[in-house]
Amino acid sequence: TFSAKAERTASSMRKTILAEIKDLANHEWAGEYYAGDGLGVNTAVAIAPKSGYVFEWHGCLGLYDRNYGGVTWTNDRIRLAFTFDNKRQGFEGLAPEFIPIRWGTRRYLVPTGDIIGFCNNVNEGREPREDVHGFCLLRRGDEKAEVSGFPIVPKEYRSYLLAEPIEAAIVSVSKCATRSSVCDWKFKDTPVTLNVGSKKGLRAGMELHVAEPGNIVESVRITKVEESRSEAVMTQIGEDATGPLVGWKLSTQAPWTRATKDKHTTRRSTE
């Protein structure tokens, strides 16, 4: 992965891939993609149908991971072959299979096992992002492209895309449990019950963020849904993390993305 030979091979493959991308013009999914925060997470994938792909993960300390190989396009899925062991833990690894998702002229590569996660990013207001940084693999340059409506996701996931945010409140809190992480600290998982369910549009796997109190930056993930109530889990870092508490208000829209989310919601409502 980190050898001089691997560096040369990756560099050579990338040049071939970029040349193929240029020849293909506006291909359905060939391109250079990026996801990250500009700090410890900077993942890049260059990919084309004949030339294969090159994946690299860069962070504050340099190169964290690299892989490359061929690609297979079957049943609207992109399947990757790995040259090196694909350890998906910490600052390593890449999903083995992706679905290309179109949103106007934008192109995303979304892991087949995380379409709900992509929809959560849209509901939260993280996508469509307006600069390069974000946690969905987006084709480079597409962050400048305007969009309207919803991204085109497989039909079984369309109900996960919300025209309006869903608001909820925590009505009960169960005993928390802790589990180890790859670092010294532990995760704290706390089951909670919310006062809304499928009647309001909630689905298992959806994520809601704490809206009140305003100084809490946490979220819950829905695990079970009934018509008028649902169960969720709040996962926090550290055994002494505050909350969750009965009465906390939640929303599928992240509080810090409200201005951007409201703008795109207005566009959808006027179509």
Image (spheres, helix red, strand yellow):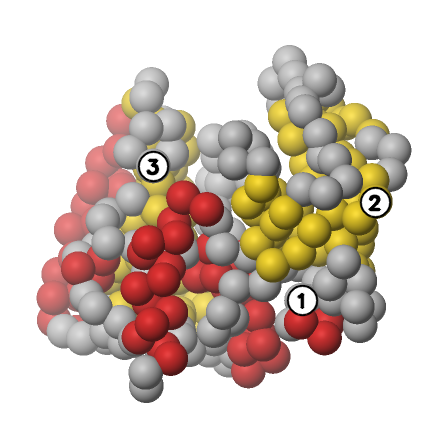
Q: Which label sits in the foreground, 1 or 3?
A: 1
Of the numbered discs in the image, which one, if any, rests on residue 37? 3
| Residue drawn where x is 48% and y is 35% of the image | 92
From the viewer's perspective, is residue 176 above or below residue 240? Answer: below
Under mark 2, the amino acid is Ser
> In what element is the residue under mark 2?
strand
Of the numbered discs in the image, which one, if any, rests on residue 202? 1
N-terminal of the two: label 3 or label 2? Answer: 3
| Residue drawn where x is 83% and y is 40% of the image | 173
> In what element is the residue under mark 3?
loop
Lateral position of residue 159 relative to residue 66, left or right: right
Under mark 1, the amino acid is Leu
| Residue drawn where x is 22% and y is 36% of the image | 8
Q: Nearer the viewer, residue 246 or 124?
A: 246
N-terminal of the two: label 2 or label 1? Answer: 2
Res 267 quadrant in image: bottom left
Lateral position of residue 221 relative to residue 258, left or right: right
Residue corresponding to mark 2: 172
Q: Residue furthest top?
A: 184
Residue 240 at x, y percent in the picture: 71, 17
Mark 2 vs mark 1, CA separation in Å: 18 Å
